Image: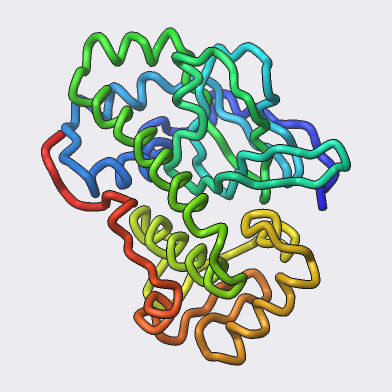
C-alpha cells in the first residue's frame, strides 16, 4: 500500500516563522496560555522549512537525528513495515504536531515517518530546542505535554484494537475531528481527509476489502461519509455515541502547566 517517494524541496527565507508556528501555538493555547515571548522563542528556533510529496519518507528508523520536525501542512504517519511488506501505521500527525520532539532525547527513532499527503514541515535544530528548555521552562513543559499526549493517543489506539472495524474507524474519525478542530481545520460537520482507503486500512489494521465495507457501513448508517477527500459527519454526537468516543485522552482543556 506504499506510494513512491519523492525529493524534499527546501524553502529557505521564504516563510514568516511566526506563521509557521501558528498551528502549534493553537494546540498549545488549547491547553494553557502562551506568552508573546514564548511564541517569539518558538519562531526563532525554526531552522529549515521543507516540502515533501506524498509517499516521501522524512525520517528513517535508527538514523541519528539532529533536528525535530514540526508539521505545518498535510498529514504524516509513524509506521512500521513487516518482512512481507505490510505497513502498519501506529500514529497519525496533523498540522501543529511536533512529530519527533522526543528525538531530542532519544537521538533516533525506532520507526519511519512518512508523508501521507504533500506536506510542509519546519525543522527545529536540537541545539535550538535545548536552548529553549534552558531559557523558557514553561514552554518546555508545554512541549513535554505534547509528547505525553502523543503517548496517550497511542494507548487509545492500542485499546481499541479489539473493537469492531466500524467502531475503530468511527473512533478514528472522531479523534481526527477533535484534533483538527483544535487547530482550526475541522467543524462539527467534518473536515478535509485527503487519505487513501489504504491509509485508513493501515491505521485500523484492516485489509483493503474490509475498509471499503466498513466505510460503506458507516455511510449507509448515516454516521460518516468518507469520499472525494472529505469526511462528512451528518451528526457528530451520533458518531461519537456509536464509537464510544471520550475525548479525555486528548487533554484539550485549559490548565496551568
In percent of width and height, residue 203 lies at: 63, 55
Query: How many labels, in total?
Result: 0
- Say left or right for 87 vs 237: right
Q: Quadrant of the C terminus?
A: top left
Point 73% across, 43% down: residue: 53
Vertical side of 192 occupied by 130: above or below: above
Point 52% across, 24% down: residue: 123
The quarter of the displayed image where residue 80 is located:
top right
Vertical side of 177 occupied by 43: above or below: above
Point 47% across, 21% down: residue: 124
Vertical side of 38 occupied by 131: above or below: above
Vertical side of 243 occupied by 79: above or below: above
- Say left or right for 82 vs 63: right
The quarter of the displayed image where residue 65 is located:
top right
Looking at the image, which residue sits at the far left?
Answer: 256
Colour theme: rainbow
Which residue is nearer to you in this view: 95 or 158?
158
Which residue is nearer to you in this view: 214 or 219?
214
Point 72% across, 34% down: residue: 57
Which residue is nearer to you in this view: 153 or 3?
153
Which residue is nearer to you in this view: 86 or 235?
86
In percent of width and height, residue 150 lies at: 42, 40
Looking at the image, which residue sits at the far front?
Answer: 162
In percent of width and height, residue 1 lies at: 82, 53
Amino acid at each position: 500500500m506504499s506510494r513512491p517517494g519523492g525529493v524534499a524541496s527546501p524553502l529557505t527565507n521564504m516563510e514568516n516563522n511566526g506563521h509557521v508556528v501558528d498551528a502549534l501555538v493553537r494546540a498549545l493555547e488549547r491547553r494553557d496560555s502562551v506568552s508573546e515571548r514564548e511564541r517569539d522563542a518558538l519562531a526563532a528556533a525554526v531552522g529549515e522549512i521543507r516540502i515533501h510529496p506524498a509517499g516521501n519518507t522524512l525520517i528513517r528508523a535508527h538514523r541519528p537525528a539532529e533536528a525535530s520536525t514540526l508539521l505545518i501542512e498535510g498529514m504524516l504517519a509513524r509506521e512500521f513495515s513487516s518482512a512481507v511488506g505490510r505497513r502498519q501505521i501506529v500514529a497519525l500527525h496533523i498540522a501543529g504536531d511536533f512529530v519527533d520532539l522526543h528525538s531530542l532525547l532519544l537521538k533516533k527513532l525506532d520507526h519511519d515517518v512518512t508523508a501521507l499527503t504533500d506536506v510542509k514541515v519546519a525543522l527545529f535544530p536540537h541545539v535550538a530546542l535545548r536552548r529553549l528548555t534552558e531559557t523558557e521552562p514553561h514552554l518546555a513543559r508545554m512541549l513535554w505535554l505534547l509528547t505525553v499526549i502523543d503517548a496517550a493517543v497511542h494507548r487509545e489506539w492500542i485499546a481499541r484494537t479489539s473493537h469492531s472495524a466500524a467502531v475503530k474507524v468511527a473512533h478514528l474519525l472522531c479523534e481526527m475531528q477533535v484534533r483538527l478542530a483544535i487547530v482550526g481545520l475541522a467543524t462539527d460537520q467534518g473536515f478535509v481527509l485527503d487519505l487513501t482507503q489504504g491509509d485508513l486500512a493501515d491505521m485500523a489494521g484492516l485489509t483493503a476489502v474490509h475498509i471499503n465495507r466498513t466505510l460503506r457501513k458507516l455511510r449507509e448508517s448515516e454516521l460518516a461519509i468518507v469520499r472525494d477527500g472529505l469526511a462528512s459527519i451528518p451528526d457528530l454526537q451520533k458518531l461519537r455515541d456509536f464509537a464510544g468516543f471520550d475525548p479525555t485522552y486528548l487533554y484539550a482543556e485549559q490548565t496551568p502547566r
